[in-house]
Amino acid sequence: MTTRNVQALFDLSGQVALVTGGSRGLGLQIAESLGEAGAKIMLSSRKAADLEEAVAHLQARGIDARWIAADAADEGQGRAIVSQTMERLGQIDILVNNAGATWGAPAEEHPLEAWDKVMNLNIRSLFVISQEAARQSMIPRRYGRIINVASIAGLGGNPAAMKTIAYNTSKGAAVNFTRALAGEWGRHGITVNALAPGFFPSKMTKGLLAALGEDNLAAAAPLGRIGDDEDLKGAALLFASRAGKHITGQILAVDGGVSAIHGA
C-alpha cells in the first residue's frame, strides 16, 4: 500500500470537477475549494453572464475553469452538460450536484407546477446527471467522487415559518438518494456523499434570512453564527479527495450545530 502525506491526500491535480449550479453561492465556494486543490473546474448553470463572471473570478485565483450554460432540470440539457464536459476535458472525476431551487408557499396552497419545478431540479437532475457521469466516465474508469448538496432542511420536518415543503421534501430525497447510490456504486470505485448545509447567505436564502432574521438564526446555533464563504470548503475537499476514499453514503451537516440540538 502506498502511504501518502496528508497534503498529497488532498491534492486534486490532474482531476476534473463538474459543479452544477456553480456560478454563485455554495456551488462557487465548492468550486474554489476543488480548484485551489488542483482540479480543473467545469461550471454549469442557466445564465451565461453569471458563469462568465464566476469563471473570471476563479481564473483570477489561478484556477483552470470554464463553463457550460444549461438547465440541469431538463433531461436533455442535463445529459449534455456531461457530454460537453467529456468532450472538452476528457473525464469527470468529481461531480458536485449543487443546482437547486426553492419555493415558498403554505402546503395547502403550494402550486403543483412549483412542486414539479423544485423536484425536477433538486432531485431528478441529481439522478440524470449522476447516471450520465457514471456511464460516460466513472464506471469505465472505476473511479469517481459524487457530492450531492442536500440541506439540513432534508433532515427533519418543515418549521411553520419556512413554508418550503417541496424544497424540504426534495432535500430529504437527496439524502436517501445519496445513501442508495453509495450502496450500489461502491463496487465501481465511486463514492457518493452529501453535504447538508444550514443557513448560509445566498441569493436563494436572502428572503428567508430577512424574514427569520439573520441574528435570530445565528443565536439558535450552538456556534452562534451562520455559514460563511469558507465553511463548505474543507468538507467538500474531504469528500472529493483521496483523503475521503473510505467514506461513502454519508451526510455531513455543516450548520453550526443546529441539527445536533434539534435531533435531525
Image (cartoon, rainbow, N blue to C red):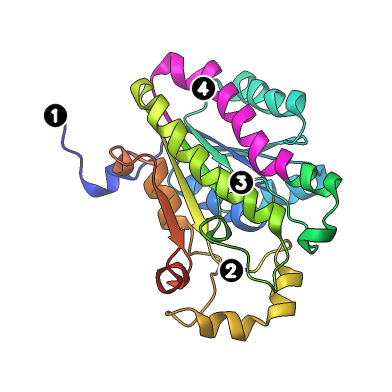
Whole-number angstrom distance, CA of label 4 to CA of label 1: 27 Å
Is residue 212 magenta-colored? Answer: no
Which structural element holds mark 1? loop
Is residue 135 magenta-colored? Answer: yes
Q: Where residue 199 is drawn, which disc sits there?
A: 2
Residue at image x 48%, y 83%? 224
Whole-number angstrom distance, CA of label 3 to CA of label 4: 17 Å
Q: Is residue 136 above or below residue 143?
A: above
Residue 249 in the image, given as x and y percentages of width and height: 39, 40
Mark 3 touching mark 4, by CB under 8 A? no
Mark 1 touching mark 2, by CB under 8 A? no
Question: Label 4: which residue?
Answer: 134
Question: Label 1: which residue?
Answer: 1
Question: Label 3: which residue?
Answer: 98
Residue 118 in the image, given as x and y percentages of width and height: 74, 47
Query: What type is the residue that disc 4 sits on?
Result: Ala
Residue 135 in the image, given as x and y percentages of width and height: 54, 17
Pointer 4 or 1: first along the chain: 1
Mark 3 touching mark 1, by CB under 8 A? no
Whole-number angstrom distance, CA of label 3 to CA of label 2: 15 Å
